[in-house]
Amino acid sequence: MKWIWDQIDKREKYPSKKRRWFLLCNTLFFALLGAVVWLIGHLLFEWNWQWGICLIGYPAFFFGYLGGLFFVLRR
């Protein structure tokens, strides 16, 4: 999370835009991470699309959005 924040901090000067961009990028990062895990599971274990929804949605919301929100609030 800190790496994403540092990259956005370098490029954006308005604090409200920094927070929005960070939450969006952090949520998408964790969704992508979940998609990669689901894709590997789908190829190896033939997981169906319900697994994909769970493995993409839960990390994106809990780790990406809520974790990012707590990270921003601490700054």
Image (cartoon, helix red, strand yellow):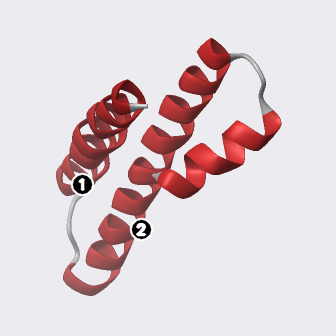
Label 1 CA crowd tier, 10 Å (few <14, some 14–19, many 20+)? many
Cα gap from disc 1 to disc 2, whole angstroms: 9 Å
Up-down relation of residue 41 to residue 11 (above or below)? below
Look at the numbered disc 2 and give the secondary structure of its residue.
helix
Q: Nearer the viewer, residue 62 or 17?
A: 17
Quadrant for the C terminus in the image: top left
- Seen at 46% across and 55% down, the residue is 32
Q: Nearer the viewer, residue 73 or 66?
A: 73
**Total number of numbered labels?**
2
For this view, does 7 lie left or right of residue 70? right
**Mark 1 vs 2: CB contact within 8 A:** no
Q: Which residue is mark 2?
A: 36
Mark 1 and mark 2 lie on one chain; the one further toward the N terminus is 2
Q: Which residue is mark 1?
A: 55
Q: What's the amino acid at mark 1?
A: Leu
**Percent x, y of residue 16:** 60, 13
Look at the numbered disc 1 and give the secondary structure of its residue.
helix
**Percent x, y of residue 5:** 57, 44
**Percent x, y of residue 7:** 69, 49
For this view, does 65 lie left or right of residue 45? right
Q: What's the amino acid at mark 2?
A: Val
For this view, does 4 lie left or right of residue 34? right
Residue 60 image-quadrant placement: top left
Question: Residue 3, which numbered label?
Answer: none
